[in-house]
Image (cartoon, grey):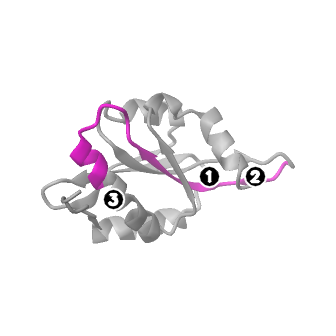
Amino acid sequence: MSSTLVVCEVDESLKAKLRKFRFRKETNNAAILMKIDMEKQLVILEEEYEDISLDELREELPERQPRFIVYSCKYAHADGRVSYPLCFIFSSPMGCKPEQQMMYAGSKNRLVQAAELTKVFETRSADDLTEEWLKNQLAFFG
């Protein structure tokens, strides 16, 4: 394939926001929704949400465009412990433009590194984004 994969940079103000988000003290569910500015080839903040469930967040996602999400939620472990994992979710629904999909896929790892996250999940259908789906994903981390 002759076309080169475009890897977008992460906006500096977004990096700062992600750092702050990682150390937040609140115990409510919250999310940062990010998109790529195609012209600037830059990952930017689209929206921030406080007190939002995964079901509500799913309604905010565009139908045929990829998005990056950092989601903080309350998670009850099988042994009774409670934690607040930060989850990186790459939503890349069917029907996206191929060049958009490639740009997002190519930029995902840089964004994950910038956000310093380890719980990284991917979905091809926004319908998958449910509390049940996330619990199943998090179960692998113990």
Q: Residue at x 28, y 36 (%)?
A: 96
Q: Quadrant of residue 109?
A: bottom left
Task: Spot the residue most to the front.
Answer: 1
> Which residue is disc 1 drawn over?
27
The reply to whether residue 17 is in sight is: no
The reply to whether residue 8 is in sight is: yes
Q: Is residue 40 magenta?
A: no
* Three-letter amino acid code of the residue under disc 1: Thr
Mark 3 is surrounded, within 10 Å at the Cα level, by few (under 14), some (14 to 19) or many (20 or more) other residues, namely: some
Q: Is residue 87 left or right of residue 139?
A: left
> Looking at the image, is mark 2 or mark 3 nearer the viewer?
3
For the residues marked 3 and 1, what is the alpha-carbon distance in whole angstroms? 32 Å
* Three-letter amino acid code of the residue under disc 2: Val
Q: Is residue 94 magenta?
A: yes
Pointers 3 and 1 in contact (C-beta within 8 Å): no
Element type at mark 1: loop
Q: Residue at x 84, y 48 (%)?
A: 80
For the residues marked 2 and 3, what is the alpha-carbon distance in whole angstroms? 34 Å
Q: Nearer the viewer, residue 59 or 118?
A: 118
* Three-letter amino acid code of the residue under disc 3: Gly
Q: Is residue 141 left or right of residue 94?
A: right
Element type at mark 2: strand
Q: Position of residue 46 (x, y in %)?
A: 29, 49
Q: Position of residue 106 (x, y in %)?
A: 33, 59
Give the magenta part as a residue range: 80-103
Q: Position of residue 3 (x, y in %)?
A: 19, 59
> Looking at the image, is mark 1 or mark 2 nearer the viewer?
2
Please give the label number shown on residue 82. 2
Q: Residue at x 25, y 53 (%)?
A: 36
Task: Spot the residue most to the right.
Answer: 79
> Which residue is disc 3 drawn over?
106
